[in-house]
Every structure is written in structure tokens, then in C-alpha cells.
Image (tube, grey):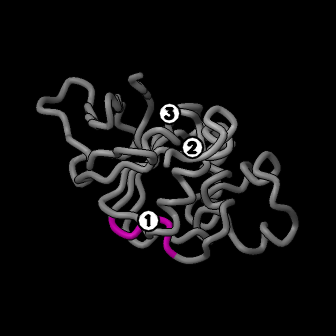
Amino acid sequence: MAIRIEGRARKFGNDINTDYIITSARKKETLDPGDLKSFLFETFDPGFAASVKRGDVIVAGTNFGCGSAMEVGVTVPLAAGIEVVLAKSFARTYYRNAVNNGLIPVECDTDGIADMEPLVIVIDAGRIRVAKRGSDPDLVGRQIAGVALDILTAGGLVPYLRAHGGFPS
């Protein structure tokens, strides 16, 4: 089953840690992603959360999601309608949390993507293509395969386990 997502690039730099995604002060109040989504990236851009649209795509440099391993760094963007993060590289814990919660982490070269640029991301059989509208050739993301792809296709680890009753042996 192919996954297709269209949205605007929302560009960030390198070393975006989970406290930049949702600040520690807010996590002390609640961990509910629905409540926290109005504070998404408030340290960088206080107006970001109000301007985000369903389908927007986070685009970043290296080491995205470093810092705390708390899942709210993944669940809050999802609650805001963000389904994909494109980055040159991810902190491993963030990558795993993203897969487990159904946020699609795509490793690719993000240098040529501009803020607010319209993007189309297609994941088909684990192969990932990122198209900048009107641009050729497409960017190719690092393939997602195996159980990680199955978990993302199911919408996250819990829906996957509900559908399959466990992991393949």
C-alpha cells in the first residue's frame, strides 16, 4: 500500500532537540498531545503552532530529535497534523519513537528544500520519493523496510500489534 502525503515544508536546522519541539516547561503541565500542540516549536517560532496546517512536513538538518527520549516530541507534531519529518539524520531514539507512534521519519538530503515549499512524499514498498512541485529529479529518501514499514503502514506500533497479535517469528 502506497502512502502519499502533500504539504508545505516547515524548515528547521541541525540539532533540533525534543525540548525545542515541545519545551520542558510545557511537559510539566501535561503530556496530552492535544493540549500541547498549541505550543509546538514555541521556543523557535511562537507563531508556529497557530500557522501549522494538516499535512505540513517538518524539514530539518542533522540529528533531529536529539535530547530527551520522551514520546511527546513525536506525538505533539502528530496531534498538530504533521505526518512526516524529513531530515538528514535522526537521533536513534527519536527515530524509533517516530516509527512506534506512526510519524514517518525520512532520511534524505534536505539542503535544497526551502521553507514553505510545496512537497509530495510517496512511500511505496518502502521506497521513498520526495518531490518538490515542479522540480525534477525527485529526492530519494533512505528506504524503510521490514517491520518498521509494516508498523508505519499500520499507523504505529499499537495498531500494528492489534492487527497482527504480535511480531512475526
Tag nearer the camera, 1 or 2:
2
Q: Residue at x 65, y 55 (%)?
A: 40
Pointer 3 local density, CA inside 10 Å: few below 14, some 14–19, many at least 20? many
Q: Residue at x 45, y 46 (%)?
A: 147
Residue 19, quarter of the rendered image? bottom right
Label 3, secondary structure: give it. helix
Q: Amino acid at mark 1?
A: Phe
Q: Is residue 134 left or right of residue 125?
A: left
Measured in 3D between alpha carbons, the distance from the residue under mark 2 to the one under mark 3, in whole angstroms, is 8 Å
Q: Which mark is residue 24?
A: none
Tag nearer the camera, 1 or 3:
3
Q: Is residue 156 left or right of residue 56?
A: right
| Among the two numbered marks 1 and 3 on one chain, the one whose residue lies closer to the N terminus | 1
Q: Is residue 91 above or below residue 140?
A: below
Q: Which mark is residue 64?
A: 1
| Among the two numbered marks 1 and 2 on one chain, the one whose residue lies closer to the N terminus | 1
Q: Is residue 63 shown in magenta?
A: yes
Q: Quadrant of the N terminus?
A: top left
Q: Is residue 107 left or right of residue 18?
A: left
Q: Is residue 87 shown in magenta?
A: no
Residue 50 visible? The answer is no
Q: Which mark is residue 153?
A: 3
Measured in 3D between alpha carbons, the distance from the residue under mark 1 to the one under mark 3, in whole angstroms, is 22 Å
Mark 2, residue position: 102
- Give the residues in magenta: 62-66
Label 2, secondary structure: give it. loop
Pointer 2 local density, CA inside 10 Å: few below 14, some 14–19, many at least 20? many
Residue 146 position in % (x across, y down): 38, 45
Q: Residue at x 39, y 70 (%)?
A: 63
Q: Residue at x 65, y 47 (%)?
A: 49
The residue closer to the viewer here, 87 or 47, is 87
